[in-house]
Image (cartoon, helix red, strand yellow):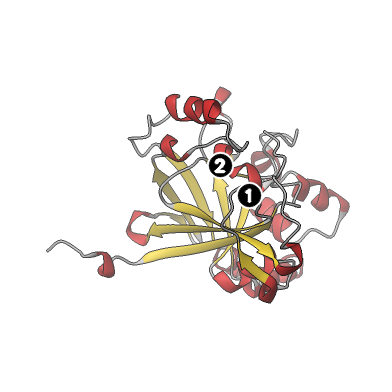
Amino acid sequence: MKLTTKEITMLNLYRGDSIFNTKSKPARYRSEGLTSSAFGGGGDPKNIERISFLETVKQHIDHLKSYEKDYFKITDYISFSGQEEIALRWSADLKPDELVTCTLPFTETRYVFHIQIPESELKVISTGVWEFNYACNKDLKSSNIPGDDLRTFALRYSTCPLCDSVSKLHSLMLVKPSMFMSDLTNVAKYKRANKLADKNDEWMILPNDLIEHGLRGTRIPRADFWQARHYLLQTEIGCERIIEYEY
């Protein structure tokens, strides 16, 4: 029997961000997709291999020491939460009651990104770690500059060299830290990371496309399984301006 939409269990993840975040620069999502801080960060593209998967997960969540802070500045991961309320708080500088939906493109200052993946399409890698394969959708791309139809046409005309926007050849790794580090809850080094991850119902997404020289990519391209919602804070209404984007 063919399953109906209601019978398909979905994994829903949410990320709150703001245009003032100079690490992730979420405003460029229209053309670049969702980018990790490693995108253009100038760090070692083999940080995970060098530092180890476990340590980079820990340092992304819990970074008190200087070397941990250095990694977090150019982290390979993109944080999400399993709870929309938490994402709304982070997008609004912890003032979610002040969020107002923004309907005028390019004047928004706050974002909530929503990922929705059928659980049946998640491949188990290990405890708390899954892989998801997908095709990007170049027709969702647009210029980061209002009215720049030429660049929008160029973005949509260019084919994806990896999947041609047809084959599910893009890859993401999804990490649920509270599960991945569940055996380390009583280890002093990981206690704080576990508490923070559990508090925020945190998930970490690792863009996993192999690009030049077998190195890992640093972005999630535009695709059908995620979308963006735009907001302003109430205190920002009336102060809207066309945002100056960086590529």
For the point 71% across and 51% down, which residue is it?
Answer: 19
Residue topped by disc 2: 30
| Quadrant position of the C terminus in the picture | top right
Residue in the picture at 57% in, 40% down: 219
* Cα–Cα gap, marks 2 and 1: 19 Å
Q: Which residue is mark 1?
A: 77
Whether 187 is drawn above or below 25: the answer is below
Dot 1 amino acid type? Tyr
Q: Is residue 123 visible?
A: yes
Residue appearing at x 33%, y 35% in the figure: 166
Q: Nearer the viewer, residue 133 or 113?
A: 113
From the viewer's side, name the closer residue of 173 and 9: 9
Which of the two discs, 2 and 1, sits closer to the camera?
2
- Whichever of callouts 2 and 1 sits on the residue coming sooner in the sequence is 2
Q: Amino acid at mark 2?
A: Arg
Q: Residue at x 63, y 49 (%)?
A: 77
| Disc 1 element | loop
Is 182 drawn above or below residue 47 in the view shown?
below
Q: Residue furthest left?
A: 1
Residue 100 in the figure: left or right of residue 168: right
On the question of residue 187 being in view, the answer is: no
- Determine the image quadrant of residue 3: bottom left
From the top left corner, tell me how far across and down residue 214 is, in percent. Answer: 55, 27
Q: Is residue 109 above or below residue 25?
A: below
For label 2, the crowd category at 10 Å Cα-Cα, with few meaning under 14, some 14 to 19 and many 20 or more, is some
46 or 234, nearer to the observer = 234
